[in-house]
């Protein structure tokens, strides 16, 4: 469970990139975080994961404060950043082993083998990440985030660069994860994915959370007969 | 068309050099960095000026001072050649900007011309030290006319054209046949090592042969002879030398003509072959078929794995290996060699040193000199000062994994500490055995050096955290265009002071007292820096996001 309570963040004085954000992502829920470029999605995700410190408010991951109990809080989630270019000089297997040591993963061999086979990169594990395409790096970072079987998945644009099969597999895994009573929080620009996958969505624009609810509720509230795209445009353009 | 080339050149130069300072928006820090740069460049200018003054006055005694002009022209041509060998593979092939430039509606030769202009600009930066300052000193000492200075400017502008062209051509031809995606790391490493070995061999040659004024004269004459023997192969060397020695308009005209022709030919040839090589440079190659096995899944100690990760990232990237690791390995070896050669051979030096040790009964002088040299030697290790920057965007990783940030900073310092200490330690033990130094001052000096190496490493990572350089167009910039390195050098200079003072004022005190004073100074500083990292890791992490 992720709780965001009255969180604000400014990069420059007088201009809030995230403004008084309140949001709770419940266990068993897939939550899609939508918004135009520069809306505050990545800033929010960075605050949830402890990369950025909030100016105000608090963020709890499974009850642990990311600021005050950061080590415990960080053990509760797996994070996929928007840029998968991490430690490109390492071989894929070295990167995954490193993560296993960080998170004390038991039965690492089984987990690494099954996940890498699922994403069809088992055969190239002995290669350096720098030789991988963007999509393959994305898969490795994604696998790295899932190895310790965290309760909360926090994924920043996770589908970017994935091939159709991997994208499908990831979506299935997200559903399974939520069905097990755990949390998936992801940002995306692909509205169809959000529409099909999410139990609830949040739409943020200019740092303010404009809507939280199901896709159906969004339609009812804004464009009654339109697609999610229409709803999204109406909400963000009127912000 | 020219406007587009000019505009693109400006952008490329800015992204390669200018971003380092421009990025620092905080007023005081920016001013401090600029002051530090002024100090560092001022120091280099001073060295260039002092060397030139010494060489010219020596040559003037025997009325051979015009040989200095040939020497300077040769140095600048060689320097442009080497610098282009090092930088051209980065600027032309390995730079990230290729991915953005190739799809843009630039004519191929506009991109080529802009890239070559960027390489020429790099050469101009070196020319300030190797060409402009020495020639100004020459002009001043020989009371040259204003025309000489105008010739100097023109010659320095055109003289890199041919060497840049030749070096670029070699790199481009090699790139046509090298599978970039597979061998680019190897290619870069070999190229840079070759250049470094050659450069250091020259410096050893110079230092071995120039220990007195008489020797200096012989070396300068040798180099002048070498320069003249190269005239048929480098006609610009001949015309540049003649233009400056005789302020000859004909030679200057011929120099400009050859350089202009070479520039045009360079653009035309590059236009034909550059793009064939560059297209493959950003693509991925085939994968190794080697499968993972049981031993690849073994649980390891987190500290060991983290430090090993740091070493792997450092050593496997050719630019980082050659710029951060290699100097720390090569310099002690060169120092040991030079140490024994400069004073006329190991036997003579051993004899001298035994006399010194007889005089230096307590070993205080030996101790202080060894500490002094070791601090000076570690000035070229840039591992901690770039430890966070080298991770690029991946530095974010440090902030979302459940390992305390300060602990990760300490792990990141380990390669720097080991690679600063161990090679110097081996060198000292080797030299001490060779020169029959007493054991105690050597061991005590190594203790101080170890503490210094730890503190220096902590200082470096603090500076890097406060001013990380995550966005770079090629890895080369992380070291080459990183002003933080000057903080590192300044730290070494400041910490030379206790050793210098020990040498001057404390040589009458017992060795253990001198050791304890140094121990307290270095120990307190290193401990203070450690506590700073531990207690201020929140602040140190602020710039990484």
Image (cartoon, coloured by chain):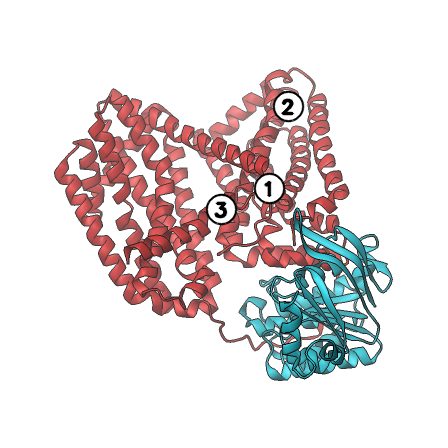
Q: Give coordinates of residue B153: x percent, y percent.
A: 27, 36
Q: Quadrant of residue B423?
A: top right
Q: Is residue A83 visible?
A: yes
Tag 1 and tag 3 share a subunit: yes
Compared to residue B233, the image places residue B503 above or below, namely: above
Query: Residue B481 bears which disc, if any?
Result: 3
Q: Secondary structure at mark 2?
A: loop
Image quarter of the C terminus of chain B: bottom right
The residue to which callout 2 is attached is B363
Query: Residue B60 bears which disc, if any?
Result: none
Query: Which mark lies nearer to you, 1 or 3?
Result: 3
Q: Give coordinates of residue B541: x percent, y percent.
A: 69, 49
Q: Give coordinates of residue A24: x percent, y percent.
A: 81, 67
Question: Do labels 1 and 2 touch, CB within 8 Å?
Answer: no
- Which chain does tag 1 point to? B
- Identify the residue at image location x=41%, y=53%: B11
Tell me the crowding category of disc 1: few under 14, some 14 to 19, or many 20 or more residues within 10 angstroms, Cα based. some
The residue to which callout 1 is attached is B426
| Front residue of this view, candidates A206 and B306 | A206
- Identify the residue at image location x=71%, y=79%: A219
Residue at the farthest right position = A63
> Distance from label 1 to label 2 (Cα)?
20 Å
Query: Which mark lies nearer to you, 2 or 3?
Result: 3
Question: Do labels 2 and 3 touch, CB within 8 Å?
Answer: no
> Distance from label 1 to label 3 (Cα)?
31 Å
Q: Which chain is red?
A: B
Tell me the crowding category of disc 3: few under 14, some 14 to 19, or many 20 or more residues within 10 angstroms, Cα based. some
- Identify the residue at image location x=30%, y=22%: B57
Query: How many marks overall?
Result: 3
């Amino acid at each position: 469970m992720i709780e965001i309570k009255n969180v604000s963040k400014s990069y420059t004085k007088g201009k809030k990139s995230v403004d008084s954000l309140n949001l709770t992502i419940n266990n068993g829920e897939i939550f899609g975080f939508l918004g135009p470029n520069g809306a505050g999605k990545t800033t929010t995700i960075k605050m949830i994961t402890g990369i950025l410190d909030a100016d105000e408010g608090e963020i709890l991951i499974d009850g642990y404060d990311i600021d005050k109990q950061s080590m415990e809080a960080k053990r509760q989630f797996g994070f996929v950043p928007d840029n998968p270019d991490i430690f490109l000089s390492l071989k894929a297997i070295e990167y995954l082993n490193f993560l296993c040591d960080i998170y004390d993963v038991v039965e690492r061999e089984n987990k690494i083998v099954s996940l890498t086979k699922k994403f069809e990169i088992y055969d190239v594990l002995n290669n350096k990440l720098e030789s991988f395409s963007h999509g393959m790096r994305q898969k490795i970072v994604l696998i790295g985030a899932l190895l310790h079987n965290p309760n909360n998945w926090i994924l920043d644009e996770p589908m970017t660069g994935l091939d159709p099969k991997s994208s499908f597999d990831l979506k299935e895994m997200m559903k399974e994860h939520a069905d097990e009573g755990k949390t998936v929080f992801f940002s995306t620009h692909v509205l169809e994915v959000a529409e099909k996958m999410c139990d609830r969505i949040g739409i943020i624009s200019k740092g303010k959370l404009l809507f939280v609810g199901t896709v159906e509720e969004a339609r009812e509230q804004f464009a009654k007969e339109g697609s999610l795209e229409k709803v999204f445009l109406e909400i963000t353009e009127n912000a | 068309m020219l406007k587009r080339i000019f505009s693109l050149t400006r952008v490329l130069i800015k992204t390669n050099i200018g971003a380092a300072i421009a990025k620092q928006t905080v007023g005081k820090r920016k001013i401090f960095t600029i002051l530090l740069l002024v100090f560092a460049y001022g120091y280099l200018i001073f060295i260039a000026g002092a060397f030139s003054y010494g060489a010219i006055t020596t040559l003037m005694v025997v009325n051979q001072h015009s040989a200095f002009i040939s020497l300077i022209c040769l140095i600048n041509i060689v320097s442009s050649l080497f610098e282009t060998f090092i930088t051209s593979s980065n600027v032309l092939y390995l730079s990230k900007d290729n991915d953005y430039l190739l799809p843009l509606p630039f004519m191929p030769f506009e991109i080529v011309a802009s890239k070559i202009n960027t390489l020429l600009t790099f050469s101009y930066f070196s020319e300030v030290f190797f060409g402009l300052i020495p020639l100004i000193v020459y002009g001043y000492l020989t009371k040259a006319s204003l025309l000489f200075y105008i010739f100097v400017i023109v010659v320095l502008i055109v003289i890199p054209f041919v060497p840049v062209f030749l070096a670029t051509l070699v790199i481009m031809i090699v790139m046509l046949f090298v599978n970039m995606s597979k061998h680019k790391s190897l290619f870069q490493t070999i190229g840079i090592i070759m250049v470094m070995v050659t450069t250091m061999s020259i410096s050893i040659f110079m230092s071995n042969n120039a220990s007195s004024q008489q020797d200096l004269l012989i070396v300068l004459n040798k180099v002048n002879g070498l320069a003249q023997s190269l005239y048929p192969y480098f006609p610009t060397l001949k015309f540049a030398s003649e233009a400056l020695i005789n302020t000859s308009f004909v030679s200057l005209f011929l120099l400009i003509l050859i350089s202009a022709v070479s520039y045009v030919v360079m653009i035309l040839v590059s236009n034909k072959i550059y793009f064939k090589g560059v297209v493959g440079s950003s693509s991925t190659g085939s994968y190794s078929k080697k499968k993972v096995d049981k031993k690849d899944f073994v649980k390891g100690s987190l500290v060991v794995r983290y430090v090993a990760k740091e070493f792997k990232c450092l050593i496997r990237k050719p630019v980082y290996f050659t710029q951060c690791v290699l100097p720390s390995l090569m310099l002690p070896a060169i120092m040991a060699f030079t140490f024994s050669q400069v004073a006329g051979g190991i036997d003579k030096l051993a004899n001298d040193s035994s006399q010194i040790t007889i005089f230096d009964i307590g070993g205080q002088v030996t101790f202080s000199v060894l500490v002094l040299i070791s601090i000076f030697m570690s000035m070229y290790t840039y591992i901690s000062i770039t430890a966070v920057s080298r991770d690029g965007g991946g530095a974010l990783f440090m902030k979302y994994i459940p390992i305390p940030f300060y602990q990760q900073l300490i792990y990141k310092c380990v390669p720097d500490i080991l690679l600063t200490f161990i090679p110097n330690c081996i060198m000292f033990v080797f030299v001490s055995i060779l020169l029959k130094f007493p054991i105690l001052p050597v061991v005590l000096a190594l203790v101080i050096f170890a503490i210094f190496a730890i503190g220096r490493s902590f200082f470096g990572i603090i500076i890097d955290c406060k001013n990380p350089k995550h966005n770079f167009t090629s890895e080369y910039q992380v070291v080459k265009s990183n002003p933080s390195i000057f903080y590192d050098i300044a730290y070494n200079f400041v910490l030379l002071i206790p050793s210098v003072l020990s040498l001057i004022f404390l040589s009458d005190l017992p060795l253990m007292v001198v050791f304890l004073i140094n121990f307290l100074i270095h120990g307190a500083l290193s401990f203070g820096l450690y506590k700073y990292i531990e207690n201020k890791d929140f602040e140190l992490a602020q710039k990484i996001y």
